[in-house]
């Protein structure tokens, strides 16, 4: 028996391994990971971990003893180079080969690069991994001027961490609003005001032409904007989105379309081979279409669905999508998936920094974005999951207890 082999030891890979074992799979399980570290949590890399001197051990997802205790072998620092679906074998850098009965590709995503001159300069950084954070942290401490390219989650979280540390921060965003594809307009506006209130210079609808070397001593980089303006930076953080690590699957002949195409339990188009997490593309029942998600919840739950399938206990992956972000004292949480055409009802008080935006498609509640209202998130998750919708009037009325809708027949 060759067992269950998993490429990539992060949320999707680890949860698949644990779910398979905990659901009775008794064959060998191997997690093959190119990073040398024990599997770790990524979200703190742009938040608390970047701000403080915390040790890497504080990020560990599961200790080595947990994997050992469950008979899950960790093969760290090993990169998978190729998959042969016909012989059910993967090859690692250096020539080693590993045979499998079931394979999970959980290779995640990587940072998108900017197609501009200067992208490769020392000090033009992206943030995906623990090693990236270890490079960024001392640079952040030493910097006085920081330029962030991209007003997405990672860019805004780094901007928040840098501004809190007293740095002069400029964020350059090409779109007309922050987090435009991910959150309701009221949330974009709130975060814009919040950042500006903390002294961050946010430029919307602004492009970058190139990144030059600084002119003299102490001037590290100059970011040249599309309007010709030149911004000095000690380092530049590029956060312009992620790209699925799907090349292994493509080369092996598996269907890919902005992610490795999978079904409701994570099966790819090749027998015995699954994909999950950031690298996969699935039909999401809440969106009603195929898409690729990048979130801890998605990687964890889809990974778990694969683990169950490998153990012979198939359960389709149907979780309501969730995401969160921390910026200053704002806890942003999102549940469900909205379209730009969905309309919005505000619950709570924007001025107090405690409000939710309920998104409706006709009479149906499809998503809720909240700032510092975790209670709304908990109930919204259950309501959306059960297909129950408050009326718009009930959603807007903070005196109305949304929990009563759960009890309704
Ligand atoms: P990944 O976590 O990307 O891990 C894939 C692993 O596979 C990596 O270790 C990679 O090196 C390895 N790998 C790739 N190719 C190979 C190969 N050929 N051989 C061996 N190994 C390979 N999500 C949230 O929900 N909330 C947040 O607040 C949040 N904050 C984030 C902050 C940062 C800085 C980052 C980078 C991400 C954040 N995310 C957040 C997103 C979340 O971390 C990802 O969606 C999640 O990590 C995806 O898990 P995964 O298992 O699919 O892949």
Image (tube, rainbow, N blue to C red):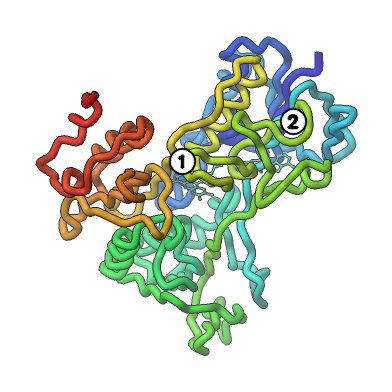
Q: Residue at x 66, y 72 (%)?
A: 115
Cβ atoms under marks 2 and 1 closer than 8 Å: no
As helix, strand or loop, the secondary structure at mark 1 comes to: loop
**Quadrant location of the C terminus?**
top left
- Position of the N terminus, as image quadrant, is top right
Q: Label 1, on which residue?
A: 286
Mark yes or no: residue 132 visible: yes
Residue under label 2: 273
- 159 with respect to 73 (left or right): left
| Relative image position of residue 48 (x, y in whole percent) | 40, 47
Q: Residues within 10 Å of mark 2 (few under 14, many from 20)?
A: many
Residue 99's quadrant in the figure? top right
Q: Is residue 331 visible?
A: no
- Secondary structure beneath label 2: strand
Q: Residue at x 33, y 44 (%)?
A: 364
Q: Is residue 66 left or right of residue 403?
A: right
State how far apart marks 2 and 1 are (Cα): 25 Å
Left or right relative to 374: residue 207: right
Q: Which of the marked residues, 2 or 1, is nearer the chain's N terminus?
A: 2
**Residue 135: quadrant of the picture:** bottom right
Q: Residues within 10 Å of mark 1 (few under 14, many from 20)?
A: some
Residue 299: % across, % down: 55, 37
Of 32 and 161, the residue lying toward us: 32
Quadrant of picture, ligand 1 = top right
Q: Which mark is residue 115?
A: none
Q: Is residue 289 left or right of residue 49?
A: right
- Front-most of residues 274 and 329: 274
């Amino acid at each position: 028996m060759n067992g269950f082999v998993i490429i990539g030891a992060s949320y999707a890979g680890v949860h698949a391994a644990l779910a398979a074992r905990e659901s009775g799979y008794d064959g060998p399980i191997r997690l093959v990971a190119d990073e040398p570290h024990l599997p770790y949590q990524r979200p703190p890399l742009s938040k608390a971990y970047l701000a403080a001197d915390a040790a890497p051990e504080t990020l560990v997802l599961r200790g080595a003893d947990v994997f050992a205790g469950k008979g899950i072998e960790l093969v760290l620092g090993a990169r998978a180079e190729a998959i042969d679906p016909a012989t059910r074998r993967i090859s690692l850098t250096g020539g080693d080969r590993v045979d499998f009965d079931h394979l999970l590709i959980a290779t995640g995503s990587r940072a998108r690069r900017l197609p501009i001159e200067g992208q490769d300069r020392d000090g033009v950084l992206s943030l995906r991994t623990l090693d990236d954070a270890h490079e960024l942290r001392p640079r952040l401490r030493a910097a006085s001027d920081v330029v962030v390219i991209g007003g997405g989650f990672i860019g805004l979280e780094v901007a928040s961490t840098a501004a809190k540390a007293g740095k002069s921060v400029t964020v350059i965003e090409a779109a007309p609003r922050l987090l435009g594809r991910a959150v309701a307009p009221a949330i974009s506006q709130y975060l814009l005001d919040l950042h500006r209130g903390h002294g961050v210079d946010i430029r919307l609808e602004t492009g970058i032409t190139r990144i030059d070397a600084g002119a003299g001593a102490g001037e590290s980089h100059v970011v040249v904007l599309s309007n010709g303006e030149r911004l000095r930076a000690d380092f530049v953080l590029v956060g312009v989105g992620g790209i699925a690590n799907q090349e292994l699957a493509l080369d092996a002949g598996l269907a890919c379309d902005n992610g490795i195409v999978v079904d409701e339990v994570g099966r790819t188009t090749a027998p015995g081979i699954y994909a999950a997490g950031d690298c996969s593309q699935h039909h999401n029942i809440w969106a009603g279409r195929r898409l690729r998600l990048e979130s801890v919840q998605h990687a964890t739950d889809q990974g778990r669905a694969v683990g169950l399938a490998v153990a012979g206990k198939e359960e389709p992956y149907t979780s309501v999508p969730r995401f969160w972000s921390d910026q200053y004292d704002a806890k942003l949480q999102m549940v469900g998936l909205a379209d730009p055409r969905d309309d919005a009802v505000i619950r709570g008080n924007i001025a107090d920094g405690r409000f939710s935006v309920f998104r409706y498609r006709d009479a149906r509640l499809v998503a809720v974005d909240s700032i510092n209202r975790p209670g709304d998130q908990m109930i919204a998750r259950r309501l959306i999951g059960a297909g129950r919708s408050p009326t718009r009037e009930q959603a807007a009325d903070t005196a109305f207890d949304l929990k009563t809708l759960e009890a309704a027949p």
